[in-house]
Image: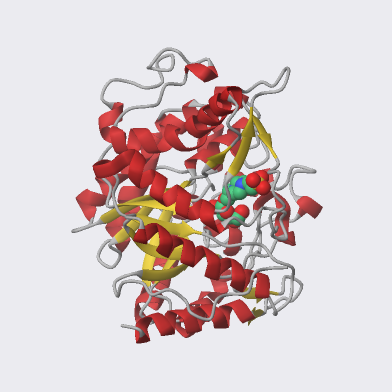
Amino acid sequence: MPTPPTSEEPTFPASFVWGASTAAYQIEGAAEEDGKGQSIWDTFVRRPGVVLDGHTGDIACDHYHRFPEDVALMRRLGLDAYRFSLSWPRVLPTGEGKVEPRGLDFYDRLVDALLDAGVTPTPTLFHWDLPQALEDGGGWLARDTAYRFGEYAAVVAERLGDRVRRWITLNEPFVHMSFGYGFGVHAPGRALLLDAVPVAHHQLLGHGLAVAALRAAVPNAEVLIANNCSPVRTTSRPEDLAAAEAYDTLHNRLFNDPLLLGRYPDLSAFGVADPSWGGVVRDGDLEIVAAPLDGLGINYYNPTWISAPSEGAGLPFDMVEPQEPYERTAFGWPVVPDGLTELLVGLDRRYGDALPPLWITENGCSQPAGLDDPARIAYLSRHIAAVRDAMDQGADVRGYFTWSLLDNFEWAEGYHQRFGLVEVDFNSPERTRTPRASFDWYRKFIAAQRQAL
Ligand code: GBH
């Protein structure tokens, strides 16, 4: 049984930002409209067997055509901010060179509609839909892609920077590296295992180049990155502790250390002994990667349980199931709100003065279809309380964006997992939207926060 939400919700500072998140490929649809180029997801979903039931994002929520309805929902919800992503191939069909003005016009209209509704637009530049033309040149395994990303950031900032101040460069570079290039379960579908590690550096280099482009084009730009971070849990056996440390290095520190400390963690547990990773990390790169950030975005879903590697494991750890009988989401993910407190406080302890303000850029859960979703309400309430606990223990957290505003294309799961505050009927041509009970709960929660001030 889900824990019911407490009647007394915690109070947050007046400036705390309440938001919701989505991503371009997961909601926009209009995959071939207005000159948009192909992304790696447009091509990946056509491979047999990679997405459940062969679902694609061709139409998705049809947000490209129906965004005014979605902005009206956000206004009703009383959101302070909306995190969405831009489709790189909509703006630059081949990833570089010729700009598609109709693609930029779409984001221009969206930004204006949001501002009109009193919702702060908070765009992410890259949420996994790389232009296919760049993948054909090596994708994020190629250093050049980082430079193309910096140029794309400049194009977008030039157009939207008069109205958009807060930006997010990348979404979850760890997940893109591991699911996309390591295991091949996401686009571009490459299963390179540890040979995927250069993808981490090239994304981070692209991030740093984008930070510079945004600061050059946008007065008082505030730049964040959204990292998927997971607290690591294990037993007290020394071999388990060593495995947990290796996992923490790959999942969390490989991204946070270079961004915040300007150096990579020791990767010798992964057979990478040379600090330049065989020439991937060049002189001067880390200064670009470590450009000061205005905030660190955290996407939190659950902790990861690790034990010492079993015989023949290709990695220095095993991912295991927790022993405790946690409540599970419809996806089967364990519900562990105190993992979020542990994560935020842990970052504060680990990075100290080097840590910029924190933002929860994603947190939410998949629940069964239907409008009555008490388990989602309980999930949100408990995780928001966990953020408050972390703040009470010293973490500087400035905002919370729930994943997601709408049911959407959940990557390899297609439309089978539902994360929305708003239900979307993917069988109706109108993609009818209906707010769930959790929508109402969040609306009242946000209103109560304002009243409490
Ligand atoms: C995010 O990724 C994405 O940014 C977003 O696009 C996506 O829709 C959303 O989350 C929901 O999936 O094996 O049980 O320990 C989340 C990355 C990676 C988080 C897998 C949870 C494993 C759960 N996820 N992870 S479990």
Residue 41 is left or right of residue 287, and the answer is right
| Residue 60 seen in the figure | yes
The one nearer the camera, 446 or 278, is 446
**x, y percent for residue 276:** 38, 17
User: Taking 252 as reference, is 366 above or below it?
Assistant: below
Residue drawn 45% across the image and 82% down it: 75
Residue closest to the far front:
236
The one nearer the camera, 65 or 267, is 267
Residue drawn 25% across the image and 40% down it: 291
Residue drawn 34% across the image and 54% down it: 395
Locate residue 66: give its quadrant. Answer: bottom right
| Image quadrant in which the N terminus is located | bottom right
The one nearer the camera, 165 or 352, is 352
User: Taking 137 as reference, is 52 above or below it?
Assistant: below
Locate residue 336: give its quadrant. Answer: bottom right
Residue 352 is left or right of residue 272, and the answer is left
Residue drawn 32% across the image and 40% down it: 351
**x, y percent for residue 421:** 59, 73
Residue 135 is left or right of residue 216, and the answer is right
**x, y percent for residue 163:** 28, 68
| Image quadrant in which the C terminus is located | bottom left
User: Taking 367 as reference, is 188 above or below it?
Assistant: above
